[in-house]
Amino acid sequence: MLKKRILIALLAALFLTGCGNAGSVETTADTTAVVETVETEPEETLDIDVQDYGGYTVNIALAGNWSFTDFVAEELTGESVNDAVYNTNQSVSELLNVNFTVDNQSGKASSGQGTGFKLFDNMVMAGTNDYEFGSIGCYDVCTLAYNGRILDLNTMPNIDLSKSWWDPKANEHLSIRDKMFFSTGDIGILDNDCTYCILFNKQVITDYGLDNPYELVENNEWTYDKMYEMADVVDSDTDGDGKQTVTDNYGFIIWQDSVIGMLHSSGGRCATIGEDGKISLTLNTEQNIDVLTEWLSMNTEPIAFFLGGATDDEVHGIFTGNRGLFYTRYVRAASWFRDMETDFGLLPYPKWDASQKDYCNTMHAYGTSYICVPVTAEDPARAGAVIEALAYYGKQLITPAYYDTTLKGKYFRDEESAAMLDIIFSSRFFDIGMYYQIGGYNEKVIQMMQQGKTDFASMYTANEASALKKLDDINAAYAAME
């Protein structure tokens, strides 16, 4: 999965095997690297019931807030990820004798009742099989799940979510009453693009004589207070006009969704699933309130430039012009600075304090999408075989093309950033409370960031009753499925 939440041992194995064998289901040991990998970590094989589906056309629905590259590749272009997607599709097409079409409606709202929800809801209500499966926006796929519109992937023939090409953290954090209605993994890269990270300007580090951030991460010193301390050094009213403008120097360039990233980096969650299978609200803790209040306050301080009221070019000019130290964004943002003259690096979001055991990273719910299958699936075994094969070949082809060739090979310029990627993706988790929009807290916290408001505790209290009501409804819906 982008080394994706894959265990470190599997990461190492993937690095050794490179792009794998594009056209074969069975493992071959024709190189020293493969032999070594088999000795240290036996390679998993694709275990599905291979059928000849007679040229059947598999129609895939793509519907989420972000535009997709997943599954979409009409021809070989020489671009590594595109070609990996194309070869993955071809491999599955040849294996199962199927063809692919994609109804790409991405870039439209996934609000819980958005495009993805309507596509599947209308299909189920009509009893049709318009789509074999979909990659549906996070908010919509959750609504589809508790409304009984999509299948439990654990019960589908040919899908084995314990395989390494599926995200093990998803199995752990998204499973409700032993049911998995949607998941992610090596089958796509969108969730990786959406993963929170911090870019930093190396020239600014040098100019101000600041600590090496990579060493801080390595030495368990990369904390919120340390990040703030470094950022505070950079702040200055460069043009002397007494105003915060794009010509000044800033410790932080802040994207609004980063407030959710900071909550998660401290280990906080909006909601969690208990052993009884019920979702519980876990946002109102002393630490969560401290974290959110502190980060919301960034928008009111001259140390930070908030992404609002300026164009992307103006904002990015702060970073590329060596006037911004930290830029809180997501992994895809690295592609925007590929031609930047000054070197930049990549960091995980910091720990809240040094006593925190692990770094914690997540992806922003607004952009992510998940694989799901409608309950009206004409042939669940066929759908399962196609999905499992796409995920399997995705691990062999798409993940290395994205992770090694594109991220490590093109976007980042140092080995340390590659190591930071490993930390970021291996420490990811899923906050089901943000996904199910419990209390609307995900959007309301972001709105507070936009509006320069800092009283999180009052906002929480004002919305607690509606949050608990929605939780009761969701828990009752899942209990009824028993």
Image (tube, rainbow, N blue to C red):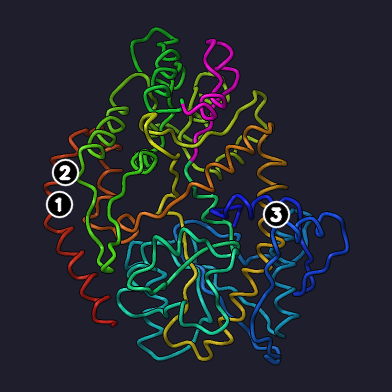
Residue found at the very far top of the displayed protein: 240
| Residue for badge 2 | 459
Residue 480 is drawn in which quadrant?
bottom left
SS for dot 1: helix
Q: Nearer the viewer, mark 2 or mark 3?
A: 3
Q: Which residues are magenta?
A: 197-220
Alpha carbons under labels 1 and 3: distance apart: 47 Å
Q: Picture coordinates of residue 272 (x, y %)?
A: 29, 57
Q: Amino acid at mark 2?
A: Met
Q: Is residue 213 magenta?
A: yes
Q: Residues within 10 Å of mark 3 (few under 14, many from 20)?
A: many
Query: Circles 1 and 2: CB distance less than 8 Å?
Result: yes
Q: Earlier in the sequence, mark 1 or mark 3?
A: 3
Quadrant, the N terminus: bottom right
SS for dot 2: helix
Q: Nearer the viewer, mark 1 or mark 3?
A: 3
Alpha carbons under labels 2 and 3: distance apart: 47 Å
Q: Residues within 10 Å of mark 2 (few under 14, many from 20)?
A: some
Residue at coordinates 33% horizontally, 11% vertically from top-left? 242
| Residue for badge 1 | 463
Residue at coordinates 49% horizontally, 37% vertically from top-left? 348
In the foreground, 45 or 38: 38
| Residue for badge 3 | 13
SS for dot 3: helix
